[in-house]
Image (cartoon, grey):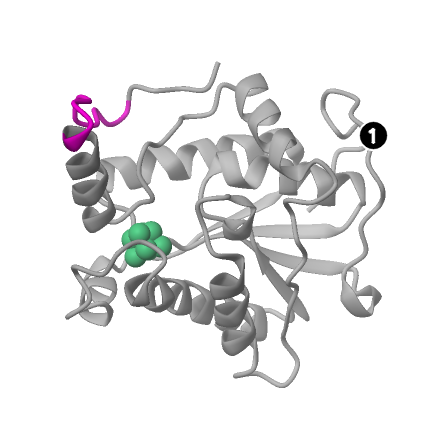
Amino acid sequence: MKIKKDLSLDGYERPKLEVPNKESKLLLHSCCAPCAGEIMEAIASSEIKTTVFFYNPNIHPKEEYEIRKDENKRFCDQLGFEFIDADYDKENWFERIKGLENEPERGARCTKCFDMRFERSALFAHEHDFPTFATTLGISRWKDMKQINDSGHRAASRYQKVNYWDFNWRKQGGSSRMIEISKRENFYQQEYCGCVYSLRDTNKWRMSQNKPRIIRGIKFYN
Ligand code: SF4
């Protein structure tokens, strides 16, 4: 993989990042283009050799999964990042969160969901000699960063030579850059976290606010 040199794409300047232990290689679990955009630019500007790992069998339905994946792939191609398209093993996901269907967001179902995605990421890191993996999930203010980082460390602890990088991507302007880049790139703007239960609950909330139900696949940042 070769990283294009002229990054950030819009000339934004930021401090260089360093992977813990000065490792030169990173596996980045990614959930979607809007969350990944700022993080990918930050690590590309820091010339960290990075492979994006798209493993999100939680996303429902399949058409939504494909849109989010394609958007992420499109930005990887733009930056010259390698993109790994992992399994959409949704049956395993549903099996794993059985009994937690009515949990609220940031509750026990989400812990299982993060565990599953990070265990797969850590396994890939182990099998392909990545000493470090990280995730894009924590940049979103909708998420509980501690819950995500606990899952990441738990997954990495399965392997002696794999570490989880719990960098706070929201800092140093990360949160606002996430929106700026999403608008600049006109990324697809999903309106629910991803699983069928988050779609159900977001629609329930919208109806309680007299707002229309989500229409998937039509909203883009601009
Ligand atoms: S709400 Fe999001 S993080 Fe929680 S289980 Fe659903 S897809 Fe996973």
Question: Residue sitting at 66 percent across and 81 percent down?
Answer: 161
**Vertical position of residue 182 compared to residue 90: above or below:** above
Kindly tell me whether residue 58 is visible in this rendering. Answer: no
- The residues colored magenta run 208-217
Asked if the residue at label 1 sits under 8 Å from ligand 1, the reply is no
Q: Position of residue 117 (x, y in %)?
A: 41, 63
Which of the 4 image quadrants contains residue 108? Answer: bottom left
Compared across the picture, whether 86 is left or right of 45 comes to: left
Q: Residues within 10 Å of mark 1 (few under 14, many from 20)?
A: few
Question: Residue sitting at 33 percent across and 68 percent down?
Answer: 112
Mark 1 residue type: Glu
Looking at the rendered structure, the secondary structure element under dot 1 is loop
How many numbered discs sit on the rendered protein? 1
What secondary structure is the stretch in magenta mostly built from?
Answer: loop
Q: Position of residue 3 (x, y in %)?
A: 74, 40
Which of the 4 image quadrants contains residue 192? Answer: top left
Disc 1 target residue:
13
Question: Residue sitting at 30 percent across and 41 percent down?
Answer: 65
Q: Position of residue 128 (x, y in %)?
A: 59, 69
Question: Residue sitting at 43 percent across and 68 percent down?
Answer: 120
Farthest residue, direction front: 209
The answer to whether residue 42 is magenta is no
Which of the 4 image quadrants contains residue 37? Answer: top right
Q: Position of residue 31 (x, y in %)?
A: 45, 47
- Of 67 and 173, nearer the camera is 173
Q: Which quadrant of the frame does ligand 1 lie within?
A: bottom left
Kindly tell me whether residue 153 is visible in this rendering. Answer: yes
**Vertical position of residue 95 compared to residue 219: above or below:** below
- Of 112 and 58, nearer the camera is 112
Farthest residue, direction top: 222
Compared across the picture, whether 13 is left or right of 10 comes to: right
